[in-house]
Amino acid sequence: MITLHQFRCYLATLETGSFTAAAEQLQLAQPSVSEQVRLLELSVATPLFTRVGRGLVATEAAHALRPHAERALAAVDAAQHAVASVRDLVAGTVRFGVFGTARIYLAADLAADVLDRYPGVRLELVGRNSQEVLTALRRGTVEAAIIALPIEDEGLQITPVVRDEVVYVSADPQRLARPVTPADLATATLVLSEASWGNADSTRRQLARAVQSVGGTLRPRVDVEDIEIALELAARGVGDAITARGLLHRLGDRLDPGLGWVSLRPKIWDEFAVVHRRGAELSPASRAVTELAVARMAEIGLLSRRR
């Protein structure tokens, strides 16, 4: 049976040209090295070295064996590194950036997924808006994030994950009788979320452009920070709200039964992407959380396509 120890002794001997030098390199006794090479020769049923004076000359078989031995040792090193990475992950802290409404979309599920898979990890999910998370990424205070597009992508690696249709929400069935156009938005009484970010918010930017395309201006009657407050005000008839289908599905029973929704025309989408600094290799911790977050967002994408 061939062992990794035999491969190490053989490669050291091949490199140094003698058992003595190989033993010094490996910090082993010379008889031990020569015995391991002898056992390897028995396993492959062919000589690997011939003696010439005080040195050794590798046979053709020894040279043919070399890449296979190197690959075997490299595979073991890679396996050890992978295990060490997971071990380090379990003991580490993961600081992962998320967009503002991620608390509704995935935050609790993602936290549960991470802690179930890596019970020793300490998790920080940070971010109130994609623009805030983008700043954190550029400053290096988070390694990776899932945020809404579009963003200024200089120096960033962007991998789109899922998109969710933006819809018009109202308590008035008459306003839901047909898809809502940019001209409708220009005259609608609206309650919009993300007050602190205004038109820096990705959804707001898209809505503003749509309204501007018909010569109007997006002017909500009420600005609030939280989408759930906007939806509550819409349920009271203060104004109509705009949000994403997947988010409405996630709210489930928390959504007022008097509210309904309809598509915009043309349709508008919230698109979400994994973002990190270009050229940077993510830590095992960030890679693991990113993979779990992408899986959860994919589920939201499926939900958003159900009517």
Image: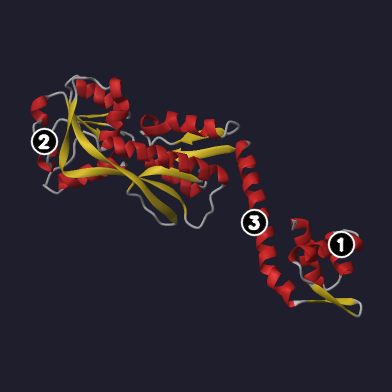
Helix, strand or loop at label 2? It is helix
Check disc 2 and report the residue beneath it.
187
Amino acid, disc 2: Thr
How far apart, in angstroms, are the residues tagged by discs 3 and 1?
Answer: 24 Å
Q: CA distance from mark 3 to mark 2?
A: 65 Å
Confirm whether residue 158 shows in the render: yes
The coloring applied to the image is secondary structure
**Residue tagged by mark 3?**
75
Q: Is residue 141 visible?
A: no
The answer to whether residue 232 is left or right of residue 66 is: left
In the image, residue 150 above or below residue 185: below
x, y percentage for residue 212?
A: 16, 47
Q: Which tag, 2 or 1, sits closer to the chain's start?
A: 1
What residue appears at the point 20 percent right and 24 percent down from the top-left corner? 234
Q: Position of residue 74 (x, y in %)?
A: 66, 59
Residue 261 appears in which quarter of the rendering?
Answer: top left
